[in-house]
Image (spheres, grey):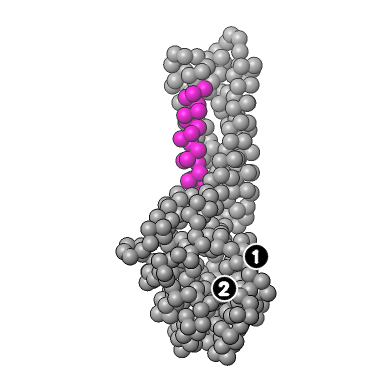
């Protein structure tokens, strides 16, 4: 079946739009798309003529009585589409301020047609004539996003995106009323089993992007929330591990006998068994989504635990005769655990708790 643009919905959230910007944009869109949904995000009577003209052009117009934010406007649009346009092939979101051109919207739609299970990103390239604030902010969030999620997206702030219809229920329930909503959906890609597919679009800034509400610090904190949760679980696991390690080393494996020679390694191994069970349950439920993983997550997790535990015991055994007593051995364990913190995060994210790939049909 060939691509038919009339099967796709264009969703436009709009707050106090400029008549001479939005109406020519909608008129041009109507030359290619039949289904256009505009959300009036509480602009009031002063902007009623804009949305009246949109209705006259054949758009569906949904109205918020008061301003609720871009995320809420998108969610309202997704909910309407999910309930009333179930025959659509997908949804394209676009801004009304001139940053997204109709040829680029068509380009994103073509990509969604070719990759119907993916979330399509209309990515700008920040190579020239780009405000420093926007370039720096996007660079920071792009690097953080890659480090935390393992997913490469060049433009994490773009509002031009394409969505399969199968994602409408998740998008309708996704939290975030303002600009954080768009970042939240990217952070949920792993849990949803959806891959991003990025296509290059024109980089257009209106008035040097002075009206942008992007906040690199807030977005950075939002991205790092996953790391913070993982770190919290690791800290709790570490405290459990440390307490049991010291308990066995100081109280159980004391006195004379051959077993005392191995008290560092044995204490390490026993402590790791208890802490790993807690860490597995915490990460499975609280950090990496809690459901729909590929088969064998438990086996893969504890296989890694065994390898890391045996390697740690080997390190403790090989350093058993390093002078300095318990203090030095405790520092060796601390250094080893710090390295494993990073290694385990990547292995759990990309290998153990890998979510099944979502399919449209």
Quadrant placement of the C terminus = bottom right
Direction bottom: furthest residue: 56
Residue 337 in the image, given as x and y percentages of width and height: 50, 32
Q: CA distance from mark 2 to mark 1?
A: 22 Å
The residue nearer to you, when weighing 154 against 65, is 65
Q: Main secondary structure of the magenta part?
A: helix
Residue carrying label 1:
173
Crowd tier of the residue under label 2, counting other residues whose Cα lies within 10 Å: few below 14, some 14–19, many 20 or above: many
When the figure is inspected, residue 333 is found, relative to residue 163, above or below; the finding is above
Residue furthest to the right in view is: 65
Which mark, by number, is residue 15? 2
Q: Bounds of the magenta span?
A: 330-354
* Cβ atoms at labels 2 and 1 below 8 Å apart: no
Q: Pointer 1: residues within 10 angstroms few (<14), some, or many (20+)? A: few
Where does the image place residue 308, in percent across and percent down from the top left?
50, 35
* Camera-side residue of 163 and 318: 163
């Amino acid at each position: 079946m060939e691509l038919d643009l009339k099967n796709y919905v264009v969703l436009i959230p709009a707050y106090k739009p400029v008549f001479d910007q939005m109406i020519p944009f909608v008129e041009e869109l109507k030359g290619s798309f039949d289904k256009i949904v505009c959300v009036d995000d509480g602009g009031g009577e002063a902007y009623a003529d804009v949305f009246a003209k949109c209705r006259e052009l054949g758009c569906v117009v949904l109205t918020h009585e008061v301003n609720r934010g871009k995320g809420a406007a998108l969610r309202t649009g997704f909910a309407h589409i999910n309930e009333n346009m179930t025959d659509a092939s997908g949804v394209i979101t676009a801004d009304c301020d001139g940053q997204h051109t109709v040829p680029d919207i068509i380009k994103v739609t073509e990509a969604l047609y070719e990759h119907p299970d993916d979330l399509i990103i209309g990515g700008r390239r920040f190579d020239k004539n780009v405000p420093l604030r926007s370039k720096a902010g996007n660079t920071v969030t792009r690097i953080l996003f890659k480090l935390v999620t393992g997913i490469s997206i060049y433009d994490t702030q773009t509002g031009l995106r394409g969505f399969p219809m199968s994602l409408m229920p998740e998008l309708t329930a996704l939290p975030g009323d303002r600009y954080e909503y768009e970042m939240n959906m990217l952070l949920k890609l792993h849990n949803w089993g959806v891959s991003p597919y990025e296509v290059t679009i024109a980089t257009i800034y209106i008035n040097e992007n002075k009206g942008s509400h992007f906040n690199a610090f807030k977005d950075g904190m939002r991205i790092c929330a996953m790391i913070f949760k993982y770190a919290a679980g690791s800290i709790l696991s570490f405290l459990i591990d440390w307490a049991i390690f010291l308990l066995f080393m100081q109280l159980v494996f004391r006195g004379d006998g051959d077993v005392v020679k191995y008290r560092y390694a044995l204490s390490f191994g026993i402590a790791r068994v208890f802490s790993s069970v807690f860490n597995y349950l915490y990460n499975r439920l609280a950090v990496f989504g809690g459901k729909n993983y590929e088969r064998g997550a438990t086996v893969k997790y504890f296989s890694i635990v065994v390898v890391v535990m045996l390697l740690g015991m080997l390190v403790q055994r090989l350093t058993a005769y390093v002078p300095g007593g318990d203090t030095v051995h405790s520092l060796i364990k601390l250094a080893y655990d710090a390295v494993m913190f990073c290694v385990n995060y990547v292995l759990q994210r990309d290998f153990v708790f890998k979510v099944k790939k979502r399919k449209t049909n």
